[in-house]
Image: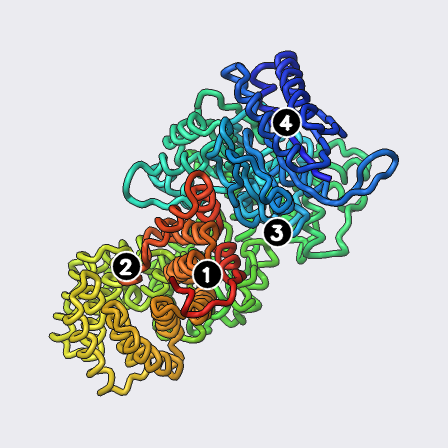
Amino acid sequence: MTFLFTDIEGSSRLEQRVGTAGYAGLRARHRTILRAALSAHGGSERGTEGDSFFVVFRDPTDALAAAIDAQRALAGEPWPTEAPIRVRIGIHAGPVFMSDDDYVGIDINRAARIEAAAHGGQVVVSEAVRAALEGRLPTEVRLADLGTHRLKDFEPMRLHQVIAPGLSAEFPPLRSLESRLDTLPRQLTSFLGRSAEVAEIGSLLRSTRLLTLTGPGGTGKTRLAIAAAAASLDDFRDGAGWVPLAPIIDPELVTPAIAHGLAVRDSGVGDLIDAIAYRIGTSELLLVLDNFEHVVTAAPIVATLLARCPGLGVIVTSRAVLHLAGEREYPVAPLAVPDPASLPTLAELGSNEAVALFVARAQAVRPDFALTAETARPVALICARLDGLPLAIELAAARIRVLTPSAIAARLEQSLGLLSGGGRDLPERQQTLRGAIAWSYDLLDPVERVYFTRLAVFAGGCSLDDAEAVSDPDRALGIDVLDALGSLVDKSLVRRSDGPMEEPRFRMLQVIREYGLERLAEAGELEACNDRLCAVVVDLARRAEPELIGVRSAEWLDRLEFEHDNIRAALRWAIAAGHIEDGLLTAGRLWRFWHQRGHLGEGLAMTRELLASPRSGATPGRAKALNAAGGLAYWQNDFPTARGFYEEYLDLCRALGDRPGLAEAEYNLAFLSAIPGDYQDAIERYDAALAIWREMNDVGRIGAGLLGLALVRYLMREYEEADRLCEQALEAARAAGDRYTEASVIGIRDRVALEQGDLDHAWEWATEGMRLYAEAGDPTGIAMHLDDLGELALLDGDPTFALRLAGAAEGVREKIAGGAPPTLVQNTDYVANARSALPGPGAEAAWAAGRALDRDAAIAEALESRRRPSGPSEAG
């Protein structure tokens, strides 16, 4: 049988706009239209719930005709401007069984999932329906391949869009699991209480598009926003995006932060807010903006997005309202606290949210802790003294390992008294939170205090070794680093997580880190600790440099991602403190990280700033940084800028007598000669570099030089010579363990094989190159191989898959604002050829579906692609 499901898009919002009575009339009209179209083609209505229909047909041609007629009729109806009825339709075919005069079968559920993935006005059918309709479609109707999609609870399915006169053809990507956004942070501890608030916020979001959670610091606004957003995901079909604003100081950076949270690139061309609005479009998306109070002047950005994106909902956490039209304030009060002077029964006290939080966190550090007649009053005192602030309660509960509740209550009362006379310019609530942290700090022994304050210089957390290098470099404190960190973790001043290679990593909450930095400055140690952090990063860069192109590149690139915030902080300190040579050397050593992990713009901006310092002289560090700046500009396709850096690098290496650097400069300039087609100059420069590397017997760089020569011969269409040079380059790269050069050589080999018509080997090389770049997480290489595999798919007669991969490649390049120089990759204009082979909306739908894929999904599709056996005779 063939199953057809329908549903009204955005029905809850439509009802809110026109009221319940008005919406009831619109829904009745919609039902009359649908029933007329469905029954006219023999549909058997099996279920009608609210806004949806479930109808069964014996023949898929009838189901298709009914769907087309229904959409045409709905489109022609004069709906109110503020409440147009748009219906999504999904069709699937499969076997069913009869049970109690009703149909039963898993394929019915599949059909429902297909409908849920569609958009209003769209008709989507399964591969099973497409196969059943083959050769039976009306001449004016066709099916556009939307690719393979994962639907909830089911294996991946290939889906198609119905294209017919009178039906809309342009839609966003399907709402499958690949396209649904969910970047809400995953919480490591339980979220206690607030169930009423979560439910109330969920209800408000159905009628309010901008909800601002306000309250003092430490009241748990962030945790509540996350919990409420997670609970509301079913009301936002396109998911939820998370944008943390705490690290942002300048309100001008709010727009880039939102763009980053939604994976929208800043191309530098056009208004970034336009790009964000285009990305959201008509999506039903929930955006959570956390910690807005210090950038409140950026509030008009939120108003702009709400005005331009009708399906967008926003939750803001802030200590102050945004004062925007349509904003609904939701004050987040501290947790309710008991009255210590009039305690309820033990059972009632245990159900108090503040007490329950204290007990849960206390049991996390001391499992035998319990709320008893003896502990009830001091626990109630603690919660009351802390005004029900969740963060303060958690810090207090961590002391249960060494102190009784009575001792905690006594010390906390003293601490609060001491704080009452200071910081009058701060809000009282902030004084309370500061007091909780200060009290926790005062409970540390002197050595632990030193460790705590010195650790605050780490902006991105730290490993055990780095913690010791900064906090106790001479091991003079008399405590093992693991014991010191373990104690700080137990006392909730430091959090532990898994770092690269499952090594433990330690990090402070931002508010606690800021307190630690204040104490460090008071102790007169801020400068010395920043110097030590800088030294740690300089050493990290020294060790990482040779690994970034080697067999362990993926491991080291991951490690540098974990350390990126510390790298930023160290380079900033190098500039501020005048350690320019250290900064130049570090930037020069880490440029391959910025390149391979898509931080091109940031890396180049930092390197430029270091090079521009008046303290930057004719030094090895400057030479290394010039090479880095040239490489980053090259991968941004800014070739004039790259040439300027490389030529200065060449001159400086000559002046310094740096022969390895001289070879590297000639090698890099050779690529810039090859781009406009000056192949003779490129060959001469590659040969000059090779002569030095052969003199040095540097096998890895010899492989790189041979790679360059192979590239030029490929561009000159001397394919046999290019392939011979590739074999030599591959042998050298593998002997040296140079994984980056190996992947680059394989990329040329797949292009050579493709040009020679050897498609079998082209597919083999292209997939192997993709695996290597995917292991390293290198977006520039991934994009190149998505294009290569897309061209091969076209040659194999699959323009839909070719355009899907082309769209995915473009999406990767957009996210990093860079990529390989087009003239060196020298892809034929296979995208235009694929569009010619698949004209109309089908081409755009395939491209858009690919562009919407995240990088991992695109890689998986590319590596799982299969092709028919072919030989040189099929190259065409």
- Which mark's residue is nearer the viewer, 1 or 2? 2
Callout 1: SS: helix
Residue at 71%, 56% in the rendered image: 366
**Pointer 1 with pointer 3, Cβ within 8 A:** no
Gap in Å between the C-alphas at discs 1 and 3?
A: 33 Å
Quadrant where the image shows the N terminus: top right
x, y percentage for residue 397? Answer: 65, 49
Gap in Å between the C-alphas at discs 3 and 2?
A: 35 Å
Gap in Å between the C-alphas at discs 4 and 3?
A: 33 Å
Circle 1 sits on which residue?
562
Q: Quadrant of residue 538?
A: bottom left
Marks 1 and 2, the one that precedes in the sequence: 1
x, y percentage for residue 23? Answer: 62, 16
Crowding at dot 1, Cα within 10 Å, few <14 / some 14-19 / many 20+, comes out as some
Marks 1 and 3, the one that precedes in the sequence: 3
Can see residue 222? no
Crowding at dot 2, Cα within 10 Å, few <14 / some 14-19 / many 20+, comes out as some
- Which mark's residue is nearer the viewer, 3 or 2? 3
Amino acid type, label 3: Pro
Amino acid type, label 4: Ser
Vertical side of 207 occupied by 406: above or below: below
Callout 2: SS: loop
Callout 4: SS: helix
Residue at 66%, 31% in the rendered image: 199
Marks 4 and 2, the one that precedes in the sequence: 4
In the image, which disc is placed on residue 821?
2
Residue at 52%, 48% in the rendered image: 438
Circle 4 sits on which residue?
203
- Which mark's residue is nearer the viewer, 1 or 4? 4
Callout 3: SS: loop
Amino acid type, label 1: Phe
In the image, which disc is placed on residue 156?
3
